[in-house]
Image (cartoon, rainbow, N blue to C red):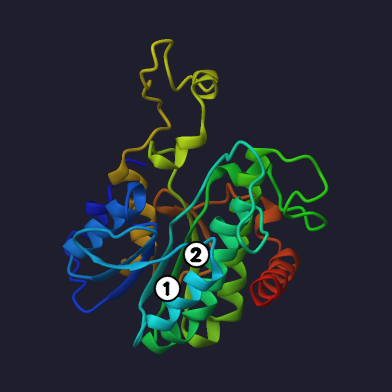
Amino acid sequence: MRTTAEDVVRGLDLTGRRIVITGGGSGLGAETARVLAGAGAEVTVGARTPVAGFRSVPLDLADLDSVRAFAAAWDGPLDVLIANAGVMAIPSRQLSRAGWEMHLAVNHLGHFALATALHPALRASGAGRLVVLSSGAHRDHPLDREDPQFARRPYDRWAAYGASKSADVLLAVEAARRWAGDGIVANAANPGWVTTGLQRHVDDDTMRAMGAMDADGALIPQPYSRTLAEGTAGPVLLAVSPLVHGVTGRYFDDTAPSDAVAAHATDPDTAAWLWDYASAAISG
C-alpha cells in the first residue's frame, strides 16, 4: 500500500501514449495526470473548469450534452481512459439535469456514457485500457436493481455512494467481457482512503466518529490512510504498466488484484443488466 505512482512509472517511457483522465483538476486525478505526463504521456484532462499545465477539455459528467461534446471532439486512437472523477456522501438527494440521482449520475452513468462514446477510439489503439476508480465502500452497498436511484426508498448518502461504486466495478466487469474482442481491457481500482476534495460533504462529526479528526478539527493520520502518491499507484499501474498486460475484469486494492470485492459487484447477471439499464438511461 505504500507503493507510489512514481514507483510504478519508473523506467517507463510513455511517449506517444494518449490518455484521458476525468476529474483531473484536483486530488487523485491531478496527481495521476502529473505522473503520467512526467513519464511522457499525452494527457487530456476532462474537468468542469480549465486545468493549467495539461490539455484540458470541459467535461461535466452529470450533463450528457457535455459528455457527448467531449467525445465528439476526440480525434484518433485513445490508449487509456481513466474514469476518476466522483462525488461522495451528498447530504440530500440531488438530481442531474437528466433526473438522475447525483452519485449514480457522476460516478457511473456519466462515465458509462463517456466510455461507450470513446469505445471506437479505445479499439483503434489496438490495446486500449479502461480504468474505473471504485472504493471499498462498495462492499456494504449493492446496487438496488428495483430502485437504483432512490426514487421510492429513503435516501441514504452512504448507500448511494457505495452503490455507485459497486456500479463502477460492474462497469469494468461487463466492459471486459463485451470488449475483449476489441483488444480492450477494463479493471476497477480502489485507491484507498486519501484526503481530497472528495470528502467535502463529510461533516466534522462524521470525521470524528471515524477517528479521523480530533476535537479541534485537526486531521488524525490513520494506518489505512494513503497519500496522493500512494493512492494513485493502483490506477497508474492499471493504466500503463506492462506488469498487468492482458489482465481484465478484475478489482484491485492498491497495486494488486484483490479478492476483497463483494460478490454483488462482480455478478455477471447484474453487470449485464446494469449495462442495458445505463444504455437506456443515456439514450432516453
Q: Residue at x 37, y 72 (%)?
A: 80
Q: Secondary structure at mark 2?
A: strand
* Residue 225, picture quadrant: top left
Element class at badge 1: strand
Question: What is the crowding at mark 2: few (fewer than 14 residues within 10 Å), some, or many (at least 20)?
Answer: many
Residue 8 x/y as whole percent: 27, 57
Q: Which mark is residue 192?
A: none
**At x 50% / y 64%, what residue is drawn?**
187
Q: Which mark is residue 129?
A: 1
**Residue 209 location, x and y as percent?**
55, 19
Q: Is residue 203 left or right of residue 232?
A: right
Q: Which residue is mark 2?
A: 187
Q: Position of residue 121 (x, y in %)?
A: 42, 84
Residue type (three-letter) at the residue carrying disc 2: Asn
Q: Whole-percent x and y of residue 169?
A: 58, 59
Quarter of the image where one finds residue 97: bottom right
Query: Outermost residue toward the front?
Result: 97
In the image, is residue 55 above or below residue 264?
below
Q: Is residue 123 above or below residue 85?
A: below
Q: Mark 1 or mark 2: which comes first in sequence?
A: 1
Q: Are marks 1 and 2 in contact (CB under 8 Å)?
A: yes
The one nearer the camera, 99 or 186, is 99
Badge 1 amino acid: Arg
- Whole-Å distance between the Cαs marked 1 and 2? 8 Å
Query: Which residue, as the protein is rendered here, is positioned at the far top?
Result: 215
**Quadrant containing the C terminus in the rendered view:** bottom right
Judged left or right of residue 277, residue 255 is left
Count residues near mark 1 (Cα–Cα under 10 Å), then give few for <14, some for 14-19, many for 20+: many
Q: Nearer the viewer, residue 4 or 114?
A: 114
Q: Viewer-proximal residue, 274 or 48?
A: 48
